[in-house]
Image (cartoon, rainbow, N blue to C red):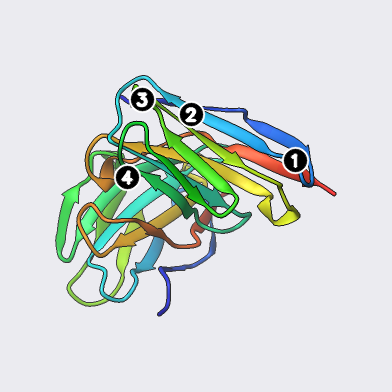
């Protein structure tokens, strides 16, 4: 039973480019969460999605960031017109239940030059 | 918003020693969780606590949910080299999406 799969593991972008991060939840999990981790800090909640629905995006910046979890395929976190402050590790977690235990992926590390 | 203060920020201990770390919150939590994160990896859940006063063990790890519901500690006994990593506390006053993480304790175990 594969764990939460995230790709790419590392992504380098120049300022102004777009970054797309993908997350495939564990089999049977329909709840997906995205967290951001800045260097030497804890994880900060960004967005919670179920299939085809954004349930809670209270932690997501209002501009340039968007997330989706389509009926088929992985969840996508999209950052448009990246800036240096977007450099961070982005973690996806999935759960089989709305308030169930979170299983984290290995993260996608974004570096903006 | 909710804030978690986790201490110490880092620890250097000798192999075989016991270690303790704790988290305090400015508000009440219904759930306390302790995670370990290895370099380049995602956090892995170690212990989950759901009731005030609860004391739970997982092998050499023991964690407690404070009576006031505003704090929790994690103890590791007889440390070994593979205990090296960053330990995070996380609290929730509602559902999983409301997890608030501490800033982590970097543990180094010296041979």
Residue B15, given in percent of the width and then of the height, sits at 79, 46
From what the image shows, is residue A5 above or below residue A43? below
Q: Chain of mark 2?
A: B
Name the residue rendered at 31%, 54% in the picture.
A33
Same subunit: marks 3 and 4: no
Q: Name which quarter of the figure residue B19 lies in.
A: top right
- Image coordinates of residue B93 in percent, x first then y, are 26, 34
Query: Would you name the residue on which mark 3 appears?
Result: B67
Q: Are marks 4 and 1 on the same chain?
A: no
User: Which chain contains the residue that carries disc 3?
Assistant: B
Q: Nearer the viewer, mark 4 or mark 1?
A: 1
Q: How many marks?
A: 4
Residue A19 in sight here? no
Residue at position x 40%, y 80% from top? A1
SS assignment at label 2: strand
Q: Disc 1: which chain?
A: B
Residue B17 image label: 1
Q: Chain of mark 4?
A: A
Residue occupied by mark 2: B23
Q: Nearer the viewer, mark 4 or mark 2?
A: 2
For label 4, the crowd category at 10 Å Cα-Cα, with few meaning under 14, some 14 to 19 and many 20 or more, is many
Q: Give the distance between the C-alpha atoms of the residues marked 2 and 3, in whole angstroms.
A: 13 Å
């Amino acid at each position: 039973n594969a764990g939460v799969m995230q790709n790419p593991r590392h992504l380098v972008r120049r300022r102004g480019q777009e970054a797309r991060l993908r997350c495939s939840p564990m089999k049977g999990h329909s709840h997906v969460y995205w967290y951001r981790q800045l260097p030497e800090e804890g994880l900060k909640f960004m967005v919670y999605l179920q299939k085809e629905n954004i349930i809670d995006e209270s932690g997501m910046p209002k501009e340039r960031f968007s997330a989706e979890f389509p009926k088929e395929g992985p969840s996508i976190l999209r950052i448009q017109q990246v800036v240096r402050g977007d450099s961070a590790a982005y973690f996806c977690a999935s759960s089989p239940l709305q308030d169930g235990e979170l299983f984290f992926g290995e993260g996608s590390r974004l570096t903006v030059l | 918003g909710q804030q978690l203060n986790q201490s110490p920020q880092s620890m250097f201990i000798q192999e075989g020693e016991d270690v303790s770390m704790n988290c305090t919150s400015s508000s009440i939590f219904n759930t306390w969780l302790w995670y370990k994160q290895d370099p380049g990896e995602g956090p892995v859940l170690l212990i989950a606590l759901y009731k005030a006063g609860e004391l739970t063990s997982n092998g050499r790890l023991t964690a407690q949910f404070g009576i006031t519901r505003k704090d929790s500690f994690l103890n590791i006994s007889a440390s070994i080299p593979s205990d090296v990593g960053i330990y995070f506390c996380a609290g929730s006053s509602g559902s999983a999406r409301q997890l608030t993480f501490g800033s982590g304790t970097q543990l180094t175990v010296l041979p």
